Amino acid sequence: MTDGYCLHLAESYLQESVAPHAGDIDAGFDALQLALQGLGDRALLALKVPKQWQGKGLSPLEFHHFQETVASYSGALAFLQTQHQTAGALLANGTNEALKCAYLPSMGTGEVLVGVGFSHLRRQGKPTLTALEVDSGYELTGNVPWITGFGFFHHFIIGATLPTGEAVYGLMPLENLVQPAGGTLQFSPPMQLAAMESTNTVSARLEGWFLEKDCLITIEPRDRICEKDKKNVLNASSFALGCAKAGLTILQTAYHKKQFPFLLEAHNALEQELENCRCAILENLQTQTLNFEQRLSLRAEAIHLAQRCAQAAITASSGAANGKSHPAQRVYREALMFAVVAQTPAVMEATLAQLLSPFPRRV
């Protein structure tokens, strides 16, 4: 199976099986679970995992295309499946060969599903979750504020901070448990969220939880996650671009229904802006020629375009867009979510600067 075939297979599945049910997928667990398994049935859930581990080994550019395409059909599915894709890539790049053998071959089909819980490592100040090295493992205590996929995923990769500032990454069960020695793992009920609530995002509390060294994936130096965020600042732009495309699809539908020339003019103008931004991002993924400030500006531009295209979809849909089940309302909420996914202080600043600018700007 070629990489191009993977992308074609995904597009066909999304058009035929996800697009007609995007509202249900956004609203409910069962529909989202079915959509996720549909990707698994087509072996599309380990796209960044090397082929030696039964993954597809897609390049960053190819994976960006995939992520953008999924987001253009369903933000909830895009956000949920990327947790698993991220887990697969981290596990494949880790040092624990036994875990790779046990989990990676089954991740592409969804037979094994794994989430992530380490975004808190980006936060400044006192760590929310700490790790102490003990005999044969690590003792974890603290809070994990954000874990998506409770009830969907069987395990998740946790990140905890050692006294040295290094980060321990380990594989954990995604269920409430008490260990024989007294360690506890307790999850909150799913959060009530404005967007993508069906993805079942929870928080967790750990008290003296023993993470065996057999479950250790890797230990990374202090601030490595921040370095990765800076290097990969354009990665999450795929979600915003896909969301913008979804908004333009709704705007185009409104034009065909109402035949107002200004709707077509608005669609064409925004579509051209989106294509310009998209081409600049894709070119950099191939050439890696832009500096950090330029890449950051493009990320903010993509976020702004998603918001503007979603607003255009709302406006063109008139009062009907106020209905919670209306496609424009869903895309509008997705634009909210994708504005803050993988957000860092630098991305926050650039996003606000973009909102203060009268026109999309690039460095």
Image (cartoon, helix red, strand yellow):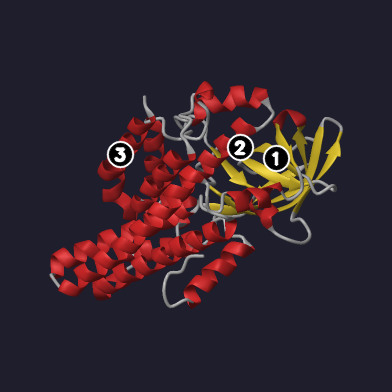
Query: Within 10 angstroms of label 3, few (less than 14), some, or many (20 or more) residues?
Result: some
Q: Which is nearer the eye, 351 or 275?
A: 275
Could you tell me which residue is drawn at 18 percent across and 67 percent down?
255
User: Which quadrant: the N terminus?
Assistant: top left
Q: Amino acid at mark 1?
A: Tyr
Q: Are marks 2 and 1 in contact (CB under 8 Å)?
A: yes
Label 1, on which residue? 169
Would residue 22 be seen by someone viewing this image from the given angle? yes
Give the residue displayed 53% in from the left and 57% down from the top.
295
Whether residue 185 sits left or right of residue 284 in the image: it is: right
User: Looking at the image, is mark 3 or mark 2 nearer the viewer?
Assistant: 2
Q: Quadrant of residue 263?
A: bottom left
In the rendered image, residue 34, in percent from the top left (x then y), is placed at 38, 41
Which residue is found at the position 25% from the left and 75% from the top?
318
Name the residue tied to disc 2: 90
* Residue named by callout 3: 13
Find the distance from the CA under tag 1 to the CA under tag 3.
33 Å
Left or right, 217 with respect to 250, comes to right
Instruction: Name which residue type carries label 3.
Output: Tyr
